[in-house]
Image: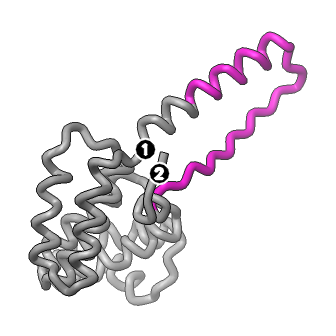
Amino acid sequence: VCSSDLAERFCSGNYLIMIQFRRPTPLLQLGLTLLLACTLTVHAQQEALRAEILRPLQAAQDLNKQNKPTEALARFAEADALAAPNPLEIFTIERLRAVVNMAAGNSAAAGKALEKALLTERGTTADRVALMEHLVLIQYRAKQYADAAVWAGRYLALGGQREQLRQVQGQ
């Protein structure tokens, strides 16, 4: 359930599940259909972005657009105070926190936020590759070579193509 522009950018509910049997019985088909429906319903409920998370994130995004990153960072306290964020909410919060921290000139905090976002394993592959690229470059500039090499390896494993990151992985 996504109810704003911010949520629409970060929510995707495209699930493709294929199960192949030689001769499924009608009872097995019914059971698998019910199991799949229940699983997708529970997963969708767990992965929704709550409105109370979206409000401070939208405010932070608006303040950041107005070149007020310090004020934008203060809005994250509201989102952080909410209990038990799900992985999609963590991904969304940390991804935006990284953007605002970069605007504020705090690349170390941006790197930590990107790492937290990526550890949720949410987002499209292309999105994750782009975030990993930024994380590797931040870590490399901060002389965190071991961490940069680990994330460069993950970047390449997901299909990242930037040659500079291939060199980072080899170090």
Residue lying at 80% horizontally and 10% vertically, measured from the top left: 27
Residue 121 visible: yes
Q: Is residue 81 above or below residue 148?
A: above
Q: Identify the colour scheme used.
A: one colour
Residue lying at 74% horizontally and 39% vertically, measured from the top left: 18
Which of the numbered marks, if any, corresponds to residue 2?
Answer: 2
Label 1: which residue? 48
Q: Amino acid at mark 2?
A: Cys
Local crowd size for mark 2, using a 10 Å CA cut-off: few (<14), some (14–19), many (≥20): some
Front residue of 122/63: it is: 63
Q: Which is nearer the N-term, disc 2 or disc 1?
A: 2
Front residue of 153/17: it is: 17
Q: Does residue 90 appear to the left or right of 34 in the view shown?
A: left
Position in image of residue 75 (x %, y %): 15, 63
Residue lying at 45% horizontally and 65% vertically, measured from the top left: 5
Name the element at disc 2. loop
The magenta-colored residue range is: 10-39
Q: Amino acid at mark 1?
A: Ala
Q: Does residue 59 appear to the left or right of 4 in the view shown?
A: left
Tell me where residue 94 sits by quadrant: bottom left
Position in image of residue 113 (x %, y %): 22, 64
Residue 139 visible: no
